[in-house]
Image (tube, helix red, strand yellow):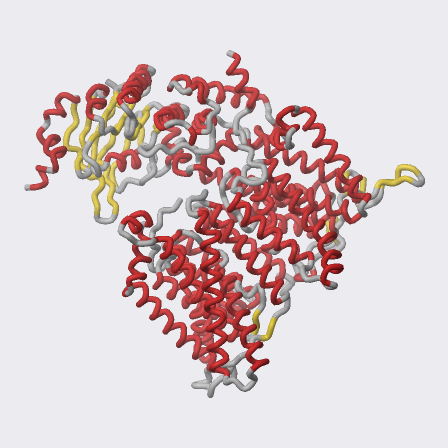
Amino acid sequence: MNELVSAVPWLGKRNPMAARWLIIIIALVAPLIAWQFGRSWVRILDFALLYMMLALGLNLVVGFAGLLDLGYIAFYAVGAYAFAFLASPHFDVHMPFWIVLPLAAGFAALAGIMLGFPVLRLRGDYLAIVTLGFGEIVRIFLLNLNYPINITNGPQGINMIDPINLFGWDLSRNLQITENFSINSLFLYYYFFLLCVAGSILFVQRLQISRIGRAWAAMRDDELAAKAIGINTRNMKLLAFSLGATFGGVAGALFGAFQGFVSPESFSLMESIAVLTMVVFGGMGNIAGAIVGAFVLALLPEILRDVAVPMQQTLFGTVILDPEVLRMLLLSLAMILMMLLRPSGLIPARARYAHAENMKREGAQ
Amino acid sequence: MITLLEARNIGKRFGGLHALTEVSLTIHKGEVYGLIGPNGAGKTTFFNVLTGSYTPDGGEFVFNGSELPSGKPHKIVGRGIARTFQNIRLFRDLTALENVMAGHHIRTKAGVWGVLTQNRFTREEERLTTQRANELLDYVGIGHFAEVVSKNLSYGDQRRLEIARALATEPQLLALDEPAAGMNATETGQLKLLIEQIRRDGITVMLIEHDVKLVMGLCDRVAVLDFGKKIAEDIPTVVQKDEAVIAAYLGGGKHAD
Amino acid sequence: METLIQQLINGLVIGSVYALIALGYTMVYGILGLINFAHGDVLMVGALTALQTMLFLMGVAPGLSPIYMLTIALMVAIPVCMTLGFLMERLAYRRLRNAPRLAPLITAIGMSFLLQTVAMIIWGRNYHTFPQLISTTPLEPIAGVFITPVQVVIIIASAAIMIGLSLLVTRSKIGRAMRATAENHRVASLMGVDTNAVIAFTFVVGAALAAIAGVMFASNYGIAHYGMGFMPGLKAFTAAVLGGIGNLGGAMLGGIVLGLVESFGAGYIEHLSFGFLNSSYQDIFAFIILGLVLIFKPTGLLGERVSDRA
């Protein structure tokens, strides 16, 4: 949160308290504003929050530990499918949300360790390709494991996944307050996801400022030196992979439940790259960067969809660049230009790995 | 005198090159022990084998009475051996303080759960780590640079920081690889005082050094390596007069014939 | 027995194409230590440019003989790809030579997707039929084994190109400069080698090979589309690693071996997995091989040219 606060332009440095409240208020009223433009915008915000969780998780692997993972979306897939298997008519299993969610997270963490073990010794660029391969293998299996036994239902995916149900409170139903006032389900999901993102930020922040965060940063900056001061780099890498994967798994489970439907299409390499771009765009290794990167790059393609498509209609009489093309163009250009012009990202805040409070105490003595 | 480290017949080959051949030496508790020799004599290789960066092809190290595991750097650090590097290897993007705090990693225990819940144990451990790191920065004389990102420190301060980081692992034996390289006379003088202080505080020091004056003025005993073999080991004044050593330094007279 | 030989031939054909692409990866890696992720997409640009040229020629000179048509198409595709390779290096990678280690790779990934997107804008999302100017009807079967003329051409042409490239690298002045630069940039430039020019040249040669491979690939399968370069690119990278990255002979060997493994793997996977997996899993072989090689023998079959770029 502190990083996010100091990232607020102008206000962040002058009046952190005001900046903090500003962020909280924006986060709370954002869906109300979005609603004015149509309900689909609230839905887009819901997805933006899921991307934030993914970006936070990937940032932990890429930004903190310096392990370039190009198959990150596989963990999202594991989480989503785990949820789909355990809470849908597909196998006719309907386990409660609070049991499925940790299970999905656990499976994803396990997948993270499974990927982590064999690739421990790989150098940065090799690691990237192998993780990419891992992501593709997972997708190929999801696509084809409908034969000879139907496990994943192949390209059609799994339908009618149970919605999120918090102790009997079904988020997929509009909340009826009075007879003619109800809160739309999209808002319920928004605030629940917001809570999840807030929790994730807290979690990641605490990890960053801890012996674990420092060990990751050390390993990222100089692996040999990290070993020489006694850091067990193998365990630290596995920890980064499995914790990062856990985020992906949780986000995936929420995604499956929210959308009610999963298919291999949602877990293509392009999605891994999209999340990576969010991290890179915001600024690798800092939490505010991941949040802002995810927010901007999840929203911008949708805005373009709304603006650029009608604009092309009026200008050229036809749509030359369809929204999907625009999104790819945006992501790939963001990635290249960011690396060339501003490699430390949109918010190049230096991440802290020590508590400010502890240091002040020392300074006072 | 109590023996702290005993190297027994350490050997290391790279392909056909014998980097170390049957090197045996003994380091006593509380001394400053110098390891010298011409370039390529195998000094840094010895450090790398000792600290687990390389696995030796033969021989063993006995530290504090029991054998050291080979090729497991973090376990060796855990047993109480810390090192610095010839070509400074700091964590570039971390501040001086964070570098030293990272060095304390192996002496701390907080796990994911503790970090997540910020329980009392974790908070206390973190506070002590910060405190200890600040003390160590003061100890090596760069306390005022605690908040400076390490890549922005001057060369001499980077060397000091690397020593502070190594001390944060709470070693019994501190292995310094050419700590005075690239330093001017004033800085070398300060370094000498620092090493003497470290020794007074009960930490045994082993150092590789080219600066003969520094070695002679600082070390209790010196071993000389040449072509991967130990050719002498004694107090500095004796070693200085050793014929084999003089020959090695003058250009391998012994090997010419 | 016949299926065995059939798969051997199929594997050789696809393996030759992988080898040609792998050479581009390996040359760039040898010199810069960079995995040029976008290399596979250069192949796609080559194939689609050739396709565009052919369609144009068919419009203006319908009677042109297929050989001429193919030659002209290559004559257009190769320079286009060379320019593309040159520009990528000049505008992006060169600026990143001293950047933090993940930056060039991330840029290369972005480049790959940018090329695909641009191709999607120009050529659309659809699969295009690639004119099969060299016949794909099998020749008279020899001992029950079918081979098509296009396959014969691919094998012969690849072999010729690989021999040519080997001669270029080992015998010519620029080849010597390339090897010197790969060994050590700084020293090479001190010896009077214009390393920037050498690196640009390497990209350009790699791109030319990719253009040819693209046309071969499209001719063999009879289709071309914006995403066609990605998988062969990854597989060729695997081939390069398998052979020992940075090593030209290794890339060739790796390409052939990978082609064979895939071909046999696809044929026998159903047996091997007790009917659980089928040939739609063909693409995972490359990844599994890549993983295994990197874990157990990261220097590859013929040994990596060690480049210490951390």
Q: Residue furthest front?
A: A315
In the rendered image, residue C233, in percent from the top left (x then y), is placed at 49, 62
Judge by depth and name the residue closer to the eye, A277 or C275. A277
Q: Is residue B71 left or right of residue A285?
A: left
Q: Is residue C92 above or below residue A226?
A: below
User: The N terminus of chain A appears in which quarter of the rendering?
Assistant: top right
Q: Is residue B178 left or right of residue A65?
A: left
Q: Which residue is drawn at 38% across and 27% down?
A: B154
Image quadrant where residue B115 sits = top right
In the rendered image, residue A128, in percent from the top left (x then y), is placed at 49, 50
Q: Residue furthest left?
A: B257
Image quadrant where residue C27 sits = bottom left
Q: Which residue is drawn at 44% across and 36% down?
A: A232
Q: In this view, does A309 lie above or below B145?
A: below
Q: Which residue lies furthest to the right in this view?
A: A179
Q: In this view, does C185 lie to the left or right of A280?
A: left
In the rendered image, residue C98, in percent from the top left (x then y), is placed at 42, 44
Q: Please give the count of numbered marks on the rendered protein.
A: 0
In the rendered image, residue B210, in percent from the top left (x then y), is placed at 22, 29
Asked whether residue C216 appears in the rendered view, the answer is no
Q: Which residue is drawn at 59% across and 60% down?
A: C118
Q: Is residue A26 above or below residue B27?
A: below
Q: Residue furthest top?
A: A365
Image quadrant where residue C243 sits = bottom left
Q: Is residue B237 above or below residue B8?
A: above
Asked whether residue C119 appears in the rendered view, the answer is yes
Q: Is residue A321 left or right of residue C260?
A: right
